[in-house]
Image (cartoon, rainbow, N blue to C red):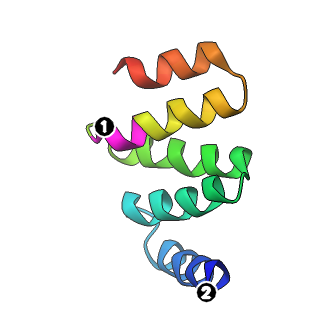
Amino acid sequence: QYAEAIVSLKRCIDLDPSIPQAHYEWGMILFRKAQFEGALRCFRVCVQLNDNEADYALMCGLTCLKLARLGEARLAVRK
């Protein structure tokens, strides 16, 4: 089921990369699969596109914790 979702999300991002929710959903899939580096890239894009959404910053911080990047985690959730 993840494979189909990833294909759809990639297609969505290819068509319009300015939709933060598509990057977020892709990041959540990668996070659930413990692919934290990829998930962090997705969540960072979300924050760049919309830095007012707390969930994006929260997932950036949580993913940094999973990667043992404590300083980055603090910065991510500070906003």
The amino acid sitting under disc 1 is Ala
Mark earlier in primary sequence (2, 1): 2
The amino acid sitting under disc 2 is Glu
Secondary element at image label 1: helix
Query: Is residue 78 left or right of 61 when viewed as pictured?
Result: left
Check disc 2 and report the residue beneath it: 4
Asked if residue 29 is among those painted magenta in the image, a careful observer would answer no
Where in the figure is residue 27, as x and y percent of width and height?
Answer: 56, 56
Query: Is residue 53 left or right of 45 when viewed as pictured?
Result: left
Check disc 1 and report the residue beneath it: 54
* Point 67% across, 33% down: residue: 66
Calculate the distance from the C-alpha at mark 2 to the C-alpha at mark 1: 27 Å
**Bounds of the magenta segment:** 53-57
- Quadrant occupied by the C terminus: top left
Asked if residue 55 is among those painted magenta in the image, a careful observer would answer yes
Callout 1: few (<14), some (14-19), or many (20+) C-alpha neighbours within 10 Å? few
